[in-house]
């Protein structure tokens, strides 16, 4: 895997993050998934009931969405899947707003100045490793 997975044999980390039941005499797992960035910031928490398995494709999609959004200084829309357009940040000036409206009219890539889309940059795709995954 191209990202670290933590082994926690003593359960110390799991207890600190609430991943093991706090009810006395039980160590049932709560089945949490934490996605922590390289700065130590928790970016995503997924909590699964004990009787439902984790969805690895969804976990990988979330990681790629976070990387894509960060690298492009953009957002991923609801139901985004890798390779689909991302949401462009809002314009900061009236001039940028006008440019955005012209771009949307020309490229048909949005609804209005506040919601327009673009493809992830090739530079970001390479940085994230999309090119490698496409070829395998």
Image (spheres, rainbow, N blue to C red):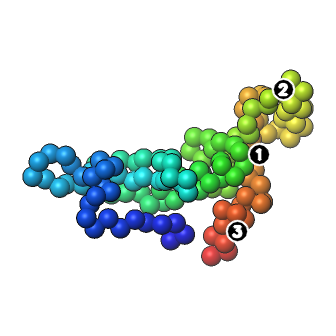
Q: Nearer the viewer, mark 1 or mark 2?
A: 2
Picture coordinates of residue 38, whole percent (x, y): 55, 57
Residue 57: mark: none
| Residue behind mark 2 | 93
Q: CA distance from mark 2 to mark 3?
A: 35 Å
The reply to whether residue 134 is in sight is no
| Residue behind mark 3 | 131
Q: Residues within 10 Å of mark 1 (few under 14, many from 20)?
A: some
Are the two marked residues, 2 and 3, in contact with CB atoms closer than 8 angstroms? no
| Residue behind mark 1 | 118
Does residue 23 appear left or right of residue 52 in this picture? left
Q: Residues within 10 Å of mark 2 (few under 14, many from 20)?
A: few
The kind of secondary structure element at disc 2 is: loop
Picture coordinates of residue 51, whole percent (x, y): 25, 53
Q: CA distance from mark 1 to mark 2?
A: 19 Å
* Position above or below: 131 against 112: below
């Amino acid at each position: 895997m191209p990202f670290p997975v933590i082994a926690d044999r003593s359960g110390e980390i799991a207890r600190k993050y609430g991943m093991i039941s706090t009810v006395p005499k039980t160590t049932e797992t709560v089945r949490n998934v934490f996605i922590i960035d390289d700065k130590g910031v928790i970016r995503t928490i997924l909590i699964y009931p004990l009787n439902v398995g984790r969805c690895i494709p969804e976990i990988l999609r979330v990681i790629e969405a976070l990387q894509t959004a960060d690298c492009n200084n953009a957002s991923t829309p609801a139901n985004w899947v890798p390779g689909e357009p991302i949401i462009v940040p809002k314009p900061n000036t009236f001039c940028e707003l006008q440019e955005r409206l012209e771009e949307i009219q020309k490229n048909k890539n949005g609804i209005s100045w506040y919601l327009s889309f673009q493809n992830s940059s090739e530079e970001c795709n390479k940085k994230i490793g999309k090119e490698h995954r496409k070829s395998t």
